Image (spheres, rainbow, N blue to C red):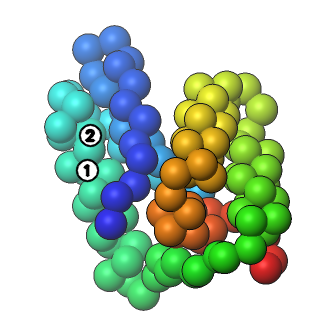
Amino acid sequence: MTIPVLMEQRGANFRASTQSPIALSADGNTADSAVDTLKSMIKSRLDSGDQLRTIEISDLDAIERLAGDLIASIPNGSTGWKSIARSTMQYLMLNDVAILSGIAKYTKVVI
């Protein structure tokens, strides 16, 4: 499974963070230590019974609604995340609907 991680340098330290559905962040002395801590946090959630699932989407209108919902769900002030999401969704809508269907788990779209 691949999860996008935002890496921020905070002075001499680093913060690794993810967005929904696993909105977590972890700090570390190095970028690698922050990511390792974040991986452990996610593994702990999954080990406790939480699940990540994907769904198949074949309706282009539903995919467009999904893209809009994903972008709208990113909090205001998170312009970097919005830009990344918008660019990613545009690319996927043009090139790979199969990958886009995996993103459905991040939204509240009902198909």
Horizontally, is 26 left or right of 29 in the view? right
Rendering coords of residue 68 (x, y %) = 79, 50
Residue to which mark 2 is pinned = 34
Residue 28, relative to residue 106: is it above or below? above
Rendering coords of residue 27 (x, y %) = 33, 36
Residue 106 occupies quadrant: bottom right
Disc 1 to disc 2, C-alpha distance: 5 Å
Q: What amino acid type should be assigned to the residue bearing mark 1? A: Thr
SS assignment at label 1: helix
Q: Is residue 32 visible?
A: yes
Horizontally, is 82 left or right of 3 in the view? right
In front: 59, or 71? 59
Residue to which mark 1 is pinned = 37
In front: 15, or 66? 66
User: Furthest residue to the bottom?
Assistant: 49
Rendering coords of residue 38 (x, y %) = 32, 51
Q: State yes or no: discs 1 and 2 in contact (Cβ < 8 Å).
A: yes
Q: What amino acid type should be assigned to the residue bearing mark 2? A: Ala
